[in-house]
Amino acid sequence: MGYTHGLRWDDERIEKEIRETMNVLNIDYFPTHSEMIKLYGNRSLTCAISKHGGTEYWSNKLDIPLKKSETSYGDKYEKYAINDIYNHIGLESIQTNTRHAYDLLVEDCVKIDVKASSINERNNGDTKYYSFNLEKKEPTCDLFLFYGIDSNNLIQKTIIIPSVTLAGQTQIGFTVHDSIWDWYLDKWELIAEYYKFMKQYKEPQKLIKKRFI
């Protein structure tokens, strides 16, 4: 995946392509994944960025600020999720805009909501847990990706749960240790399975034509 048309994606080429993208789009911030994909018509550059450190890494390395609308707490972990998904299962994702009812779209097929929570305490600190607001009883995504953040602002726990499992709930919490939800701990393969299934029906017109030929 590090090659396109016989050329290798190294740091020098990635930097060159990022700066050329900024020049073409006439922007002074780090280009978003959707902007890069729209400009080039493919995921080559976004894939290379994900594989070689991720958006935040390259933004810091080149001293190029992120788009102002993308510096919120939630957005930070959406970017982590983009890189995590690629690093674990090799699938590319893009962030949606605020009008969408989900946060990420994986390979134009799988809809994911990303949630992050710092540690909460109860029982005089004896119980430490993460709490997430799902916002609506009827999910508008295929999967939820939950990040549990420790006191050092590091991701301590990643839970991936199908939205159908949480239908009807507006809140979910899991303890730092020995949670009933730990069965879904680092279940990256769920995203791959959803993608494999959804990809079959991505172009329904072709399927219909094929059936009647």
Image (cartoon, rainbow, N blue to C red):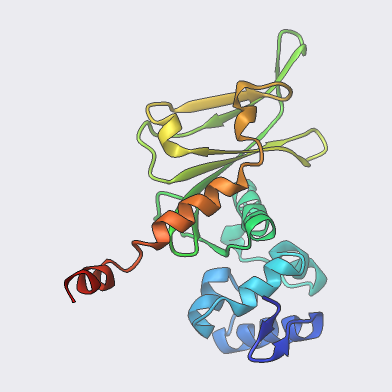
| Residue 171 visible in the current orientation | yes
Q: Give coordinates of residue 57: x percent, y percent.
A: 77, 64
Q: In the picture, which quadrant includes the N terminus?
A: bottom right
Q: Compare residues 26 and 127 and report the one nearer the observer.
A: 127
Report the side of 12 relative to 147 (left or right).
right
Residue 6 is left or right of residue 167, and the answer is right
Tell me: residue 105, above or below residue 112.
Answer: below
* Front residue of this view, candidates 47 and 210: 210
Looking at the rendering, which quadrant does residue 25 occupy? Answer: bottom right
> At x 37% / y 31%, what residue is drawn?
137
- The image shows residue 86 at horizontal and vertical percentages of 64, 61
Q: Please identify the quarter of the rendering in which residue 129 is found.
A: top right
In this view, which residue lies farthest toward the bottom? 6
| Pick the front one: 23 or 132 | 132
State whether residue 175 is above or below residue 198: above
Can the viewer see residue 98? no
Residue farthest to the top?
123
Q: Residue at x 48, y 39 (%)?
A: 162
> Where does the C terminus fall, quadrant-wise?
bottom left
Residue plotted at (35% across, 35% down)? 138
Residue at position x 65%, y 88% from top? Answer: 20
Residue found at the very far left of the displayed protein:
212
Residue 183 placement: quadrant: top right
Expressed as whole percent of the image width and height from the top left, the position of residue 31 reads 61, 74
Closer-to-camera residue (27/191): 191
In the image, taking residue 111 as reference, residue 6 lies left or right, namely right
Expressed as whole percent of the image width and height from the top left, the position of residue 29 reads 65, 73
